[in-house]
Image (cartoon, rainbow, N blue to C red):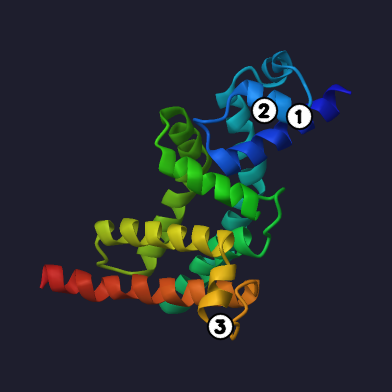
Amino acid sequence: MRASLRDALFEAAVKLFSQNGFNAVSMRDIAKAAGANVGSVTYHFGSKANLLREIYERHTRPMNARRLELLGEARRISDADERLMAILRAYVVPAYLSSTEGDGGGAEFTRMRAILSAEGNDEARRIIAEAFDETSHIFIDAIAGCLPGAPLEGLVWRSQFLLGALYYALINPDRVTRLSGGAVDGSNKEAAVEHLVEASYASFRGLVAEGLRLTG
């Protein structure tokens, strides 16, 4: 019974956070949505921050593990351009092609990540950093290894742009279909991965010329 109630509270929190953000949702709101009393939230999770931390851990652990597994394979590629493409694919594919709520790639969890990132809540910001920063640093270092002379500033900014594009593509694929007048299927995950990887590759490759210009 406790396990099922715990799951109900967990699922209610994900839904409410993805709709309203972290700040606007109370423990009472979560309990009500799960058909429980507020004391049950405290009993199972201790605090709203601890509940959010568990949501991130459960959703991101498999995604980060898969990213690092694919990154290990990509690093064995000797050609720098091919390696860069493989590294970018290693980052995008687990978030995009998985696309289920249990492995970090689902639209609901991605929407929650985007809303919480924009809120600026200190507790939520720390939890997000704990979940993603280590893996992000590993990927930035791997990308830098493919682009000798690329400035760190550009690497970090363009990594952020890639993350933003990934968020938006996952959350709002219908817009692609609408803007193309139905000629392009925004829900085509394989096509989305290819376009994200190709656009990011061009963006990162441009840093080499930028680095030469700055040092020349």
Looking at the image, residue 187 lies above or below residue 71: below
Task: For mark 3, give the secondary structure.
Answer: loop
Mark 3: few/some/many CA within 10 Å (<14, 14-19, 20+): few
Quadrant of the rendered image containing residue 26: top right
**The label number, if any, that marks residue 181 in the structure image:** 3
Residue 35: x percent and y percent? 79, 26
Rounded to the nearest whole Å, what is the CA distance between mark 1 and mark 3?
Answer: 40 Å
Report x, y in % for residue 207. 28, 70
- The residue identified by callout 1 is 34
Task: Give the residue at x 38% y 56%.
Answer: 160
Disc 2 target residue? 30
Q: Residue at x 27, y 57 (%)?
A: 152
| Disc 2 versus disc 3: nearer the observer | 3
Where residue 146 is drawn, which disc sits there? none
Q: In this rendering, is residue 40 above or below 172?
A: above
Residue 214 visible in the current orientation: yes
Number of numbered tags placed on the structure image: 3
Could you tell whether 119 is left or right of 40 in the image?
A: left
